[in-house]
Image: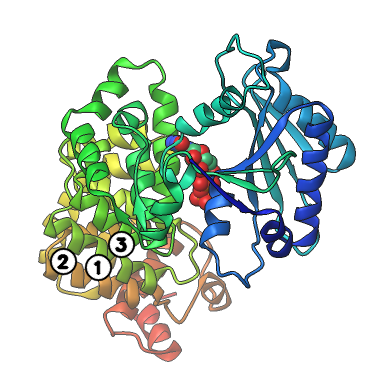
Amino acid sequence: YRVSTSFSTQLRDRLAPPLWEFLAKASEQAQKRGWHLYLVGGAVRDLLLADPDETLLLSDIDMVVDGFHRSADVGAGVELAKALQNTYPEARLEVHGQFQTAALLWHLDPVLDSLWVDIATARTEFYPYPAANPEVEASSIRQDLYRRDFTINALAVRLTSPRAGELLDFFGGLRDLRSRQIRVLHANSFIEDPTRIYRAVRFAVRLGFQLETQTERYIRYALDSGIYERSLIQNSKAPALQTRLKAELKYILQAPYWKGALKLLGDLEALKCLHSTLELDDQLWKQVRLLERCLRRFDPEKTLDHWQMRLEVLIAHLAPEYRPKVAKNLQLPDDSIKRLQQLDLDQANVAESLPACIHPSEITRVLKQYGLPTLILIAVQSQRPIRRLIWKYLTQYAHIQPPLNGNDLKALGYKPGREFKQMLDHLLAATLDGEIRDRADAESFLAKYYPL
Ligand code: CTP
C-alpha cells in the first residue's frame, strides 16, 4: 500500500521556506512526544499535481497526529497545536469538539496568505496490541484516511521519523491522480455525507478529472434513494447538513469553473438535493445564461453577490410555493428569502402592467418600485417582450434625471412643500418621454403646469 518515494526533499524544495520550517517544527514537537505526524488531504494532492518547478502556496494545511493508541493521547492534536502556538505566538488557536481537533490561524509570512492549519487526532479504536507492531501502528492513520471522501484526498505524507517523507497511499490515490479519476473509498460514502456529491463535482471540474464509473453510480444511487430529503427530515443533524451544503454550493457557484460544475450537477440530477423537483432543464440553463448577461451589464462592480444570484435563479425555477422554504433551508439572508417569496406576485404584476405601457414614463413607474436583484430575476424568467422592456429600463430610463432638481425649483421661486415631489415626478416623466430636453424646456413646462 505504500509508495516509498521520499517526499522530504520534494516538500523542502517546493514549499515556501517558512512553511517548510513550520512543518519541521511541528514534526519535531510530535516526535518529542512519541507521536506520528502526517500531512494529509488537499495539500498532498496539490503537491503531487503541481508542476515540479512550482513553489506551492498552501493556505490550508491538514495534519493528523497519531497518538499510538494510548488513551491518554486522545487530545494529541490539541496538545500539539498548543505547543506550536508557543513557537508561533501570533497564531490564533481554535479547539473543535471535545479533544479531537484544533486549528491554528495566522499570518506566517508577509508574502504568504494567512495560513490555516487543522490538526486532528487520528480516530482509532484502541487495539490491545503493542504499538510497535507496524501493522497496528499504521492502522489508525489508515482508518482516519478511510473516513475521507476520495482516494486523491486520502493520501498522507509522514512527517515524523522513522520513514519521514514516506507517502502513504492505502487506497490507490496516486493511481487515480495519474489517471485523473475522482473515486470514493467505499459504497456508502455519499449516503453518509451527501455534500460529497457536490465535492465530487467540484473536484472533477476544478481539476479536469472524470468521475470514476462506479463512483458516478454511487452518486446516482444515493440521489435516487432520496437520501438527501430523508436525512433532512429525520436527522437531527440536518441544520449542519444544510450549512455544509450551502458552503459547497457557494464554493461552486463563485468559482471560475461554476458553469461546468453546474452543468455536471445538472447531468447527475444532483440539484434534487435542493428540492426534489429541481432539474437543470433547457429553460433553467437559458435563464442562467441570461442572468450572466444581466450581471455583466448591470453589476460590473459586483455590488451583488453573484454566486447568490445564481442560486436565486435556481430556486426561482421551482414552483412559487416551494421557493421560500428552500431559501430558508439554505439559510439565505432575509432580503433574499423575501425577494423569492415576493417574486411570483412581482412577476405577475409586471407581466400584467408592462404590456399596457406605451411611454417610457409608464414603464418607469411600474419598474422603479423594484430593486435590481428582483428586476434581474423577473427578466430572466420572463418572455422576450417583457425582458426587453426591463432591459431598456435598466440601461436607459433608470439613469435619466430631469434637468431641474429641488434646489432649482426653490431658486425659481417655488415654495418647498408637498407639491415638490409631484412637480419633480412630473418633470421626470416629461423628460423620460422626450417632452423636456433641456433646462429651458423644463422651465416652460413649469410655467405651463405650475404657474407661480
Ligand atoms: N473531507 C471529507 N468529506 C467532506 C469534507 C472533507 O472527507 N465532506 C476531507 C477530505 O479528505 C479533504 C479534507 O477533509 O481532503 C479537508 O477538507 P477541505 O479542506 O474541504 O478539502 P481540501 O481537499 O483541502 O480541498 P480544497 O483544496 O478545496 O480546500
Name the side, left or right, on which 152 lies relative to 378: right
Is the residue under label 2 in contact with that under label 1 (CB below 8 Å)?
yes
For the question of whether residue 449 can be seen, the reply is no
The residue under the point 27% across, 29% down is: 228
Instruction: Kindly state the secondary structure of the residue where label 3 is placed.
Output: helix
Residue kind at label 3, given as amino acid type: Gly
Outermost residue, top side: 128
Crowd tier of the residue under label 2, counting other residues whose Cα lies within 10 Å: few below 14, some 14–19, many 20 or above: some
Instruction: Return the disc, 2 or 3, that comes first in the chain's sequence.
Output: 3
Question: Which residue does the image show at 19% across and 45% down from the upper left?
Answer: 269
In the image, what residue type sits under mark 1?
Ile
Taking the spot 44% from the left edge, 47% from the top edge, the residue there is 173
Could you tell whether 75 is left or right of 370 in the image?
right
| Label 1 to label 3: alpha-carbon separation | 29 Å
Residue 347 is labelled as none
Given this view, does label 1 or label 3 mark the residue nearer the observer? 3
Q: CA distance from mark 1 to mark 2?
A: 6 Å
* Residue under label 3: 260
Q: What x and y, as percent, mark residue 422?
A: 38, 63
Viewer-closest of 375 and 148: 148
User: Which amino acid type is marked by label 2?
Assistant: Ile
Query: Is residue 200 something one can see in this rendering?
Result: yes
* Residue closest to the eye, 185 or 257: 185
In the image, is residue 24 above or below residue 210? Answer: above
Name the residue tied to disc 2.
Answer: 386
Q: Earlier in the sequence, mark 1 or mark 3?
A: 3
- Evaluate if marks 1 and 3 touch, with contact meaning CB atoms under 8 Å apart: no
> Camera-side residue: 220 or 244?
220
Q: Which residue is disc 1 drawn over?
A: 390
Residue 344: x and y in percent read 20, 45
